Amino acid sequence: MVATITNLTPGGPPVVPDESLTYVVPRTKRIGIGGWLAIGWLVIMMLGIIILPFVLHNPSSAGTLASKGIFKVPGHPLGGDGNGNDMLLELAKGGRNSLIVAVGAVLFGLIFGGSLGLIAGYFRGKLDTGLTSIFNVLLAIPQFVLALSLVSVLAANGVNSQGAPQPATFTRRLVVLVIALGIVSIPILARITRANSLQWSQREFVLAARAQGASNLRIMWREILPNVAPAMFSIALLGIAVAMVAEGGLSILGAGVQGGYSWGNIIATGRGQFQTTPHIVFEPVVCIFLTVLSINYVGDIVRARFDVRESTL
Amino acid sequence: MRAGLRRVIQLVIVVLCVSFFSFFLLQLVPGDPVTSIVGFSSPADHKAIAHELHLDQPLVTQYWHWLSGFVHGNLGQVYYGPTGRGKVSTLIGQSLPVSLQLMAYAMILTLLIAIPLGVFAAYRAGTIFDRIANATAFGSIALPDFALALVLSYWVGVKLRWVPSSGYTHPSDDLVKHFKTMVLPSTSLAVGQIAAYMRLLRSDMISTLQEDYILMAKSKGIPNRRVLWRHALRPSSLTTLTVAGLNIGALIGGAVVVEVIFGIPGMGQLLFTAIFERQFVEIQSIVALIAIGYVLVNFFIDLLYAFVDPRIRDARAAL
């Protein structure tokens, strides 16, 4: 995730650039054609992921496409994979797992990072200093390497008493991926939540709530969280895109979900016969690209609407 | 000076935390670590390996042994069964230069393209050129580096056969071939970075161009080219520099995947093999090296910051 930090110049009035000159692609509150296209792709993708497996799933046809790994197969718009399965069905099934991992990881980060950031921003003082240094240490390791190392140890194949490797189950790998990518997203989400809670906890209505005898927990939950939420969610939206890309990268390195499909996993499997049947690799690549592009675009619009500054990161 | 001392202390603490995390990875492996590393071993061998890894001692002592070994260049062993051994430091010694080459090429390519593009897009803000450059950058950021790597290796490597689609040649063996094997991986890494840097530089540059001293320079009749490059670029490069630290993290992560796709024997490939062969000691050392390197790079970028903008140097000195 790339953060834009503006106006670092110390002293002097902040530079307010002329509106007409700061035209950055979707930095507008209007949704526009691009925005509708992005939303359209996200809706179509979600519907496809949910509906297609039921419509296309036909146990008797699994692995029966006569010409394995061929792109042009009548009745199968996206061709077949190396095992003779319909690519469209595989992509739908894979997309489901990719999305579960990405959304799950960000939810994990939102729950833990969000509450830690809220606590740090609300209580301030030593607690804040301590938590912030923990976030900084987590940020001191390149995100992808952190995720990779966590997955590699947590999802390590167990060994039975004879020392023979026991492959980790599909569910276990899925959970490990969610946790590993979730841990990676904790410091980012925590920092944005902290920065926002710092400001909101100074407001009069917080003082009023306190004067009425509201507990700290209640103030955080009822007064601060609703105000911080827009910033958290707009960053979380971008986090989903980042997690999705990370899942793809991890799969290529053999550290993704195995035994079940994900977009990254389809790429990893297809790489073996890349030179002869490139469509198996390119189709999931296009899916990831379009999804990430759409999420980034929608994310920018959401941030413009809620006026979330990335500079608070 | 006191601020400087505080920064160094912070640096040491972060390095210690990061190294402890890397050390702790072995503890996170489910089940018995010795069995996870070497598979089946006789009770005597098992005990010997556990002793070698100091696993029979308390956690803090283990960390101390690991850390002092690490500082002295003993990066642990790779285990081939209960008795076979290889030195991790030898493997890293072979791989690290290759990764550094790859990242250096990617970085050079990035700066060569991103700076002129960013400056020009800001100078011509709002024009067709600016819009196209921006839209392309927005798209490139959404394109994962592995995706670009796969597309390039297919079209340029397999279809057009301009350059080999995988493999690595040492520069001392054949310099031309070396660059041919590195051009696709560095491009795959650079495109996302170019987009990120260009967008940042452009938006900073636009703010700078509104400053009074730019107007002053222009009214003195200094040619635009000189105003852009000599007056506006340096104060505009601050944000870009700050984010460079974060971007290098992305570059390292990207390099890991891109190396594996193009079969380049760097640190990423080494880490990939180590994970596949469950060489957890090797994983510890590689992760520690990468993380410490990343921390140090960010520290130096922070120092560089003050050189680029004297106002920050003075502001810090006043603290």
Image (cartoon, coloured by chain):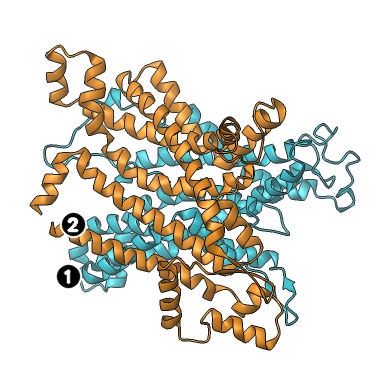
Chain colours: A cyan, B orange
Residue at point 64% right, 49% down?
A264
* Image quadrant assignment for residue A140: bottom left
**Can residue B275 be seen in the rendering of this structure?**
yes
**Quick check: B153 left or right of B239?**
right
| Front residue of B166 and A267 | B166
Q: What residue appears at the point 74 percent right and 41 percent down from the top-left corner?
A: A88
Secondary structure category for the residue under label 1: helix
The amino acid type, in three-letter code, at marker 2 is Gly
**A118 displayed left or right of A156:** left
Which residue was labeled with disc 2? B4
Picture layout, residue B237 above or below residue A95: above
Where B116 sits versus A89, above or below? above
> Compared with residue B231, is residue B37 higher up or lower down, i.e. above or below?
below
The chain ID associated with circle 2 is: B
Q: Is residue A238 visible?
A: no
User: The numbered mark 1 sits on a residue in which chain?
Assistant: A
Q: Residues within 10 Å of mark 2 (few under 14, many from 20)?
A: few
- Furthest residue to the left? B318
Q: Nearer the viewer, residue A157 or A299?
A: A157
- Marking on residue B185: none
Using the rendered image, report if marks 2 and 1 lie on a common chain: no
Q: Which residue type does callout 1 highlight?
A: Ala
Q: Position of residue B94 (x, y in %)?
A: 55, 53
Residue A310 percent across, percent down from the top left: 33, 45
Question: Which residue is disc 1 drawn over?
Answer: A211
In this rendering, position of residue B259 left or right of residue B59: right
**Left or right, B155 with reference to A215:** right
Instruction: Count residues near mark 1 (Cα–Cα under 10 Å), then give few for <14, some for 14-19, many for 20+.
Output: few
Of circles 2 and 1, the one toward us is: 2
Point out residue B42 in the picture as x, y percentages from the top left corner.
Answer: 71, 85
